[in-house]
Image (tube, grey):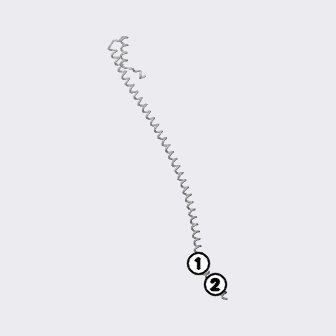
Amino acid sequence: MTTVWEWFWQVLALFLIIVILKKLLFQPVSDFVEKRRQLIAEEVNTASSQKKQADALKIEYERKIKDINREADTILKDARAKALTREAEIIEAAKTEAQNIKQKATEDIKLEQEKVKDEIKTQMIEVANLMASKFVQSSIDDSKQTQLISEIIDEMGDVQWLS
């Protein structure tokens, strides 16, 4: 019977060792594994939420970039339109100024022509006076008159440019 008692004590000792090991080792290890599992689950959830936030930020930034590009295009179009308008204004001002210069030059030419005409009239009057005085000084016959006219024409010079 010693073997039964030994066997009984060995089973009881084994049972006690299993209970003690369960309390001392198995329970802390299973608690550690459970805590680790929960920590990993939290990290996965955190990573998932951060990825969603990152995706949302990426979408928002892409939208903002598109808005900025659209705004830049609008600004460039406005600047081009203003430049074209300014160009047209400058061209119109230049045309107006050229027209004014042309008109002023035409007026100056007319004034100069009037001045020349007045000078010619004065010279013609002087020539006529000279001719009249020479006419009075000498008795005129046809040969004398022809000679007198030739002299006057020579003194006047070529006046064909006036016509």
Give 15 or 114, whichever is nearer the viewer.
15
- Amino acid identity at mark 1: Leu
- Amino acid identity at mark 2: Gln
Distance (Cα) linking label 2 and label 1: 21 Å
In the depicted structure, whether residue 62 falls above or below residue 142: below
Q: Residue at x 63, y 84 (%)?
A: 10
Measured as percent of width and height from the top left, residue 48 is found at 58, 64
Disc 2: CA contacts within 10 A as few (<14), some (14-19) or many (>=20) = few
Give 121 or 95, whichever is nearer the viewer.
95
Which residue appears farthest toward the left when viewing the image? Answer: 137
In the depicted structure, whether residue 20 falls above or below residue 107: below
Which residue appears farthest toward the bottom when viewing the image? Answer: 1
117 displayed left or right of 48: left
Q: Which image quarter holds the N terminus?
A: bottom right
Q: Residue at x 36, y 22 (%)?
A: 123
In the depicted structure, whether residue 48 falls above or below residue 100: below
**Badge 2 element:** helix
Disc 1: CA contacts within 10 A as few (<14), some (14-19) or many (>=20) = few
Q: How many callouts does the rendering have?
A: 2
Query: Which quadrant of the figure has residue 121?
Result: top left
In the depicted structure, whether residue 36 falls above or below residue 134: below
**Residue 25: mark:** 1
Measured as percent of width and height from the top left, residue 114 is found at 40, 27
Q: Which image quarter holds the C terminus?
A: top left
User: What residue is shown with label 2?
Assistant: 10
